[in-house]
Amino acid sequence: MPDTKIDNIDRKIILATQAGLPLTQNPYHDIADQTGLDPGIVMQRMKMMLERGVIRRIGVVPNHYRLGYRANGMSVWDVQDDKINELGKKIGALEYVSHCYHRPRYLPEWPYNLFAMVHGRDRESTEHHVKQIAGILGDAAHGYDILYSTRILKKTGLRI
Amino acid sequence: MMNKLDRAIINHLQGGMPVCEHPFAVVAMQLNITEDMLIERVQALLEDGTLSRFGPLYDVEKIGGIYSLIAMKVPVEGVNKVIPVINSYPEVAHNYERDHEFNLWFVVALDTEDRLPSLLVDIEERTGYRVYNMPKLDEYYVGLKFHA
């Protein structure tokens, strides 16, 4: 359930900034000009949205391939249901795991219920990380696979 | 190639853009460069593709919306027809091809949850392939930063 409401002012700001901020000395003033809002209001609302988690962060999003992380593997695991919460938290805490989720299985085609994105500079290092995960999961994991990305087909921000 | 300054900018700016009158000036001072130089480097890194975007990252779930991960199994001969159909939906935020029988993996972001079922039916009808909806049941970790 959503724990936050946004009003029309927030919505205007989201619409004006979801594709990015202008690269100018006073970007929040430019957003104020675009939306017809007072610059003070824009900044106050954006600070509030940061506090409430509506904005996760403000900054740059690097293309991780360009930073040298070329082997980006989605490791997927068939983990015993009664152990998944305890183990998922452990896997999520590993430094090379960027995202970790419990998701539904589609038996028999898709037996995997734990997803951990693993990033390495090459496949060898990614596979080394995955072996460590296998060691942590032990007998609670009945199988796994690694799905490497071969093409980024689309990557954009939120659109509302 | 990125130099030391570019790496420092990327590491610093992944979460550190303040909300104030002169945000670039504040960050530039911490990096010991001028405001104009910082703006110019961020612009250049966006243009050459090192950065994919700059600005606020919104969490659609906090405003009553949802994300879901969708997988599809599309045979090789069909994949180039299916990709543009999927990418044409503004609700599709990310789409990756992966080396597996389940080869297309995309994330949809919706401002209201009740639009998901009809969107999935629409994608199935337009592509002719089944979609496997894999919403998160639990989130154990979402990291936001990469070390440059």
Image: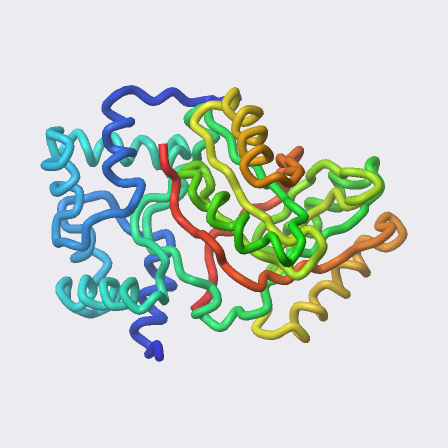
Q: Position of residue B101 (x, y in %)?
A: 72, 54
- How is the protein colored in the picture? rainbow
What residue is rendered at 77% in x and 41% in y?
Answer: A84
What residue is rendered at 64% in x and 54% in y?
Answer: B103
User: Furthest-right residue in view?
Assistant: A139
Residue B135 figure quarter: top right
Question: Which quadrant holds the C terminus of chain B?
Answer: bottom left
Does residue A136 lie above or below A125 as drawn? above
Residue B122 is left or right of residue B57, and the answer is: right
Q: Position of residue B146 (x, y in %)?
A: 47, 61
A76 and B83: which is toward the camera? B83
A89 and B93: which is toward the camera? B93
Residue A96 figure quarter: bottom right
Q: How many marks?
A: 0
Residue B98 is left or right of residue A112, and the answer is: left
Question: Which quadrant holds the N terminus of chain B?
Answer: bottom left
What residue is rendered at 27% in x and 65% in y?
Answer: B47
Q: Position of residue B143 (x, y in %)?
A: 52, 51
B51 and B17: which is toward the camera? B51
Residue A145 figure quarter: bottom right
A128 and A19: which is toward the camera? A19
Does residue A134 lie above or below B61 as drawn? below
What residue is rendered at 34% in x and 69% in y?
Answer: B8
Q: Position of residue B107 (x, y in %)?
A: 53, 42
